[in-house]
Image (tube, rainbow, N blue to C red):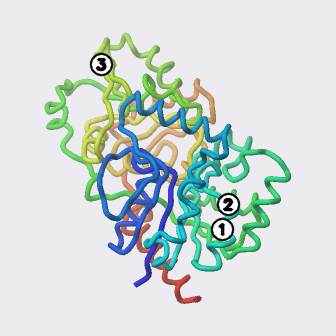
Amino acid sequence: MYKIFSINHIWWRTGSAKVAELLTAISTDNHLLVWYDFSQKKDPQKSSVFFTKPTLLYTYWYKFWVGLNFVFDILRPWYYWYKKLKDNPNYKNADIFHIHCPQWWYFNWQDINHIAKEKKIVMTIHDDRLTAGNDNYNLYFPYKTRRSFLQRMDIFKNNNIHFVGVSQWATQKVRDICWIDTLQTIYNGVDTKIFYTREKDTLRKKYNIPLEKIVILSLAWSGSKTHMKWLGYVDEIYQKYKNRKDVLFITVWNASVRKPYHNYREMSYLKAEEMAEYFSMADIFLYPTLADNCPLIVLESIACQCPVVSFNVGGVSEVVQHTINWYIARYKDITDLIAGLAWTIKNKDRLTISLDKKFYLETMIDSYKMLYQSLIDKS
C-alpha cells in the first residue's frame, strides 16, 4: 500500500482543508502537515507549524503573522520547517507528496526540484484566488511579474508533477495559463453520511425558528467581510428584507456574535453535523462569492436539498443548473442577485434539488486512489 504525505496552508475552516483531511484518512499510514491549525484537535495523522483558536482575537493574530510573511522572508513558515522535511519520518516513508493550495507564502517552490527526485508529486488546485475577479490574476503567480512567471514555469516543466483541478473550469484555466498536460479533474466530494436532508419542522423547533418563516442562510459578514467572498452583498440584500416579518436571515461562522435583532441572527463556528442541520432547516443558501472553484459548501447545501443563490463564477455552474436547483446571477450584478433571491423564494417549493454522484465523497476518494496507484505503477 502506498503512503501519502500531504501539505496544506491551514487545517479546518476551508474546503481544501476538508479534502486534504479526508484523503489523509484513507490510510493510517498517511500524514498531513499544515502551516496553521484552527481546529485544536489532536490527531496522530496531522501536525502543524502554528495553531490558533477559533476566536476573533486569534484570527487577528493569524492575520498579523500572515502580514509579516509578506514583509520579512525570514518569517515564512517554510524556513522554519521545510529544511527539516527530509528528516521528517512521515515524509521519508511516503511514496507520494501531495500539495494542496500551493500558495507561495507557505511553500518554497524551489524545493520541488529536490522532492521530485525522491517522490511522486500531486498538486491539487483548490484555491479561490484562481477565479478571483475572473481573469484579473491567478493563484500561481501573485507577484504579477514576467520573471516570477517564468521561474515557476521552469520548475513545473523540469519536474514530473501531476496536477488536479477540482472543476473542469479550473482544469482548463490551469492548462491555458501553464501549458501543462499532466492534468485531470477530480471534483470535491461531499460526505453524504453527514450532509443529507433532515426533517425541517423538527429542526425549526430545535432551534426555535417559526415554521412559517422563510429562512435565508449565509456566511458571516459581521466577523468576516472578505473581498473574495464579498459578503457585503449579504448585508446589502438584508437591508431590503429587514422589514419583512416572514423572512429570517441567519449567518453562520461569525468570528463574533451579536444579539439577534429584527429578522436577523448570527451564529458562530459550526461542526459539520450542525451545518447540515442548518442547511436542512433553511429555505435558501445565499452565497454571493466572487471567487470559487468547486465550492464544497455549495455541494453540502445541495446534498441537504437547500437551493442556492450565487454569482456565476469559476466552476460553480458545473455544480448546479440555473433555475433547476439554484439561481446563478450574473457576475457582480447585485440587481440580478436580488432578483434571483426573490425568484428562488417564490419557486423554492418546486425546485428539483439532488446531488450528482460525481460529487460524492466516495467518488472523489476512488478517483484519487486510482491516481495514486497509477503513479506508483509508473515507478
Q: How many labels sit on residues?
A: 3
Report the front residue among 176 and 45.
45
Report the front residue among 23 and 312.
23
- Name, please, the residue furthest toward the right: 146
The amino acid on which the numbered mark 3 sits, given as a three-letter code, is: Asp
Quadrant of the image for the N terminus? bottom left
- In this picture, is 374 found above or below 96? below
Spot occupied by residue 28 in the image (x, y as percentages of width and height): 32, 72
Q: Secondary structure at mark 3?
A: loop
Q: Could one spot residue 200 in this view of the protein?
A: yes
Spot occupied by residue 188 in the image (x, y as percentages of width and height): 46, 59
Q: Alpha-carbon distance for marks 2 and 3? A: 53 Å
Q: Tag 2: Cα neighbours inside 10 Å, few (<14), some, or many (≥20)?
A: some
Residue 160 found in image quarter: bottom right
Contact between labelled residues 2 and 1, with CB atoms less than 8 Å apart: yes
Residue drawn 20% across the image and 27% down it:
211
Residue drawn 73% across the image and 44% down it:
137
Q: Secondary structure at mark 1?
A: helix
| Closer to the eye: label 3 or 1 | 1
- In this picture, is 200 found above or below 127? above
Q: Which residue is mark 3?
A: 246
Q: Could one spot residue 339 in this view of the protein?
A: no
Q: Which residue is mark 2?
A: 109
Spot occupied by residue 130 in the image (x, y as percentages of width and height): 65, 49
The amino acid on which the numbered mark 2 sits, given as a three-letter code, is: Trp
